[in-house]
Image (cartoon, helix red, strand yellow):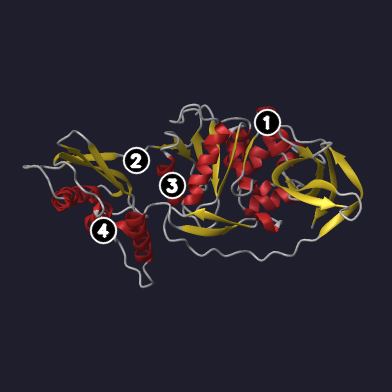
């Protein structure tokens, strides 16, 4: 990969195969996506081969994060430095955010990460802590050969990757597309006949897919009319399926409001496929409420009324109420309940004397009080001194790499930035 973007998918309960299956959702944005077994929540996406021309890396990353967000998955991204370092940093970046770290800034940024981020195991971490090694920077206190001989291959491989060697990742191939032509003896003048032919065609195709451990991710029906017009209908169920009956039912809802202006002379079906899970192959039965019914209800709504119909409320880890909640379009399966960790209340504390800082520069990392800013909330316009001489300022809440949240004010007239306190 020439410019890999480390995409971290949040969620402790995610299975490794889920993250790999999500790669098929992203292949439309980048044809080359890779994963490494020891970082199951990370995907590396090639940014230099994006199908969309004239798309910058930040624009591509924004599309990747937004697309996963529509599928109800939180993610963050880092690129610019070595692939492994980018993957570690992406774990610390808040959901929905991304960063570019230049190679000459990698060491200063990565050194502050805690030692447990290397995932060496609890015993190795406790042993390193007893030696006074709590962060990656502390590894420089001991000779590298001594660390590698004591902690073995796991640490040796990770140190090599931090030096720039890429992981032994596996490239996920784009999902296959199977095309099947419909056998049409006479011209089709009624769409019911088209549905009947489509069902008989895909039923045999689904048997072949099931034998290969595959399932249909999207069905596209295309037809050429007598006046050479091309008609196309697409069905994209919430979960991959091997049920011809269900996909035809969704297709029927799509065709209900369609009127044929000219007879159909030729038609074909495209099946986009991906590896099937045990749910699709029905290897076991569950006694709990079947979420499949909920997903099918969403599929019916989208098929009959359109894709941009369903919205969900999403809370964000923001201190300021203005940014705490948003409405987002829901594209994936029925949303699962999310447990929210109970957090202590935040209290703002003032510095005795405000500390003046350098303003941010576009395209460059911003260091505030000697630490890299990884998340910026704001601007929040405020008015001060309205009873005497009114002044307008912008308020910001800035999270730095150590986890602290600094309280910053900016005067838009003079571009004066100063830290007036912190949030604890």
Q: Position of residue 154 (x, y in %)?
A: 58, 42
Q: Position of residue 395 (x, y in %)?
A: 78, 48
The residue at 50%/59% (across/down) is 312
The residue at 88%/43% (across/down) is 355
Q: Which mark is residue 22?
A: 3
Question: Compared to 146, does 195 lie above or below?
Answer: below
The mark lying in front, picked from 2 and 4, is 4
| Cα–Cα gap, marks 3 and 4 | 23 Å
Q: Is residue 110 left or right of residue 15?
A: right
Label 3 packing within 10 angstroms: few (<14), some (14-19), many (20+): some
Question: Compared to 283, does 23 lie above or below?
Answer: above
Question: Which callout, 4 or 1, points at the residue further toward the start of the chain?
Answer: 4
Farthest residue toward the left? 185
| Cα–Cα gap, marks 4 and 1 | 49 Å
Question: Compared to 313, does 217 lie above or below?
Answer: above
- For the question of whether residue 405 can be seen, the reply is no
Q: Quadrant of residue 339?
A: bottom right
Could you tell me which secondary element the residue under label 4 belongs to? helix
Question: Which callout, 2 or 3, points at the residue further toward the start of the chain?
Answer: 3
- For the question of whether residue 35 can be seen, the reply is yes
């Amino acid at each position: 990969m020439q410019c890999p973007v480390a995409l971290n998918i949040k969620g402790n309960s995610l299975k490794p195969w889920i993250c790999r299956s999500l790669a098929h959702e992203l292949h439309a944005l980048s044809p080359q996506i890779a994963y490494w077994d020891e970082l199951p929540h990370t995907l590396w996406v090639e940014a230099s081969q994006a199908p969309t021309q004239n798309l910058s890396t930040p624009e591509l990353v924004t599309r990747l994060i937004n697309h996963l967000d529509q599928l109800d998955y939180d993610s963050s991204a880092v690129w610019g430095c070595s692939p492994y370092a980018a993957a570690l940093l992406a774990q610390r970046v808040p959901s929905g955010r991304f960063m570019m770290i230049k190679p000459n800034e990698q060491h200063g940024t990565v050194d502050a990460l805690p030692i447990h981020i290397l995932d060496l195991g609890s015993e190795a971490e406790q042993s390193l802590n007893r030696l006074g090694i709590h962060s990656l920077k502390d590894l420089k206190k001991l000779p590298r050969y001594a660390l590698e001989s004591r902690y073995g291959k796991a640490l040796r491989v990770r140190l090599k990757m931090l030096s720039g060697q890429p992981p032994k990742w596996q490239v996920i191939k784009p999902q296959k597309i199977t095309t099947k032509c419909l056998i049409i003896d006479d011209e089709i003048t009624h769409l019911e006949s088209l549905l009947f032919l489509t069902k008989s065609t895909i039923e045999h195709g689904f048997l072949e897919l099931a034998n290969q451990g595959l399932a249909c991710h999207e069905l596209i029906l295309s037809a050429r009319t007598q006046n050479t017009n091309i008609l196309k209908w697409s069905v994209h169920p919430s979960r991959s399926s091997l049920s011809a009956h269900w996909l035809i039912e969704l297709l029927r809802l799509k065709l209900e409001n369609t009127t044929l202006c000219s007879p159909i002379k030729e038609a074909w079906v495209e099946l986009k496929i991906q590896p099937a899970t045990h749910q699709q192959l029905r290897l076991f039965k569950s006694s709990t409420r079947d979420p499949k019914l909920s997903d099918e209800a969403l599929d019916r709504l989208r098929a009959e009324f359109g894709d941009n119909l369903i919205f969900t409320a999403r809370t964000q880890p923001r201190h300021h109420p203005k940014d705490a909640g948003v409405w987002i379009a829901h594209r994936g399966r029925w949303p699962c309940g999310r447990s929210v960790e109970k957090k202590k209340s935040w209290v703002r504390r003032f510095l005795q004397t405000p500390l003046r800082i350098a303003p941010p520069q576009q395209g460059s990392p911003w260091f505030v009080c000697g630490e890299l800013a990884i998340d910026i909330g704001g601007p929040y316009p405020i008015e001060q001194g309205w009873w005497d001489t009114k002044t307008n300022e912008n308020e910001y809440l800035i999270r730095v790499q150590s986890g602290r949240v600094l309280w910053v004010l900016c005067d838009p007239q003079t571009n004066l930035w100063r830290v007036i306190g912190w949030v604890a």
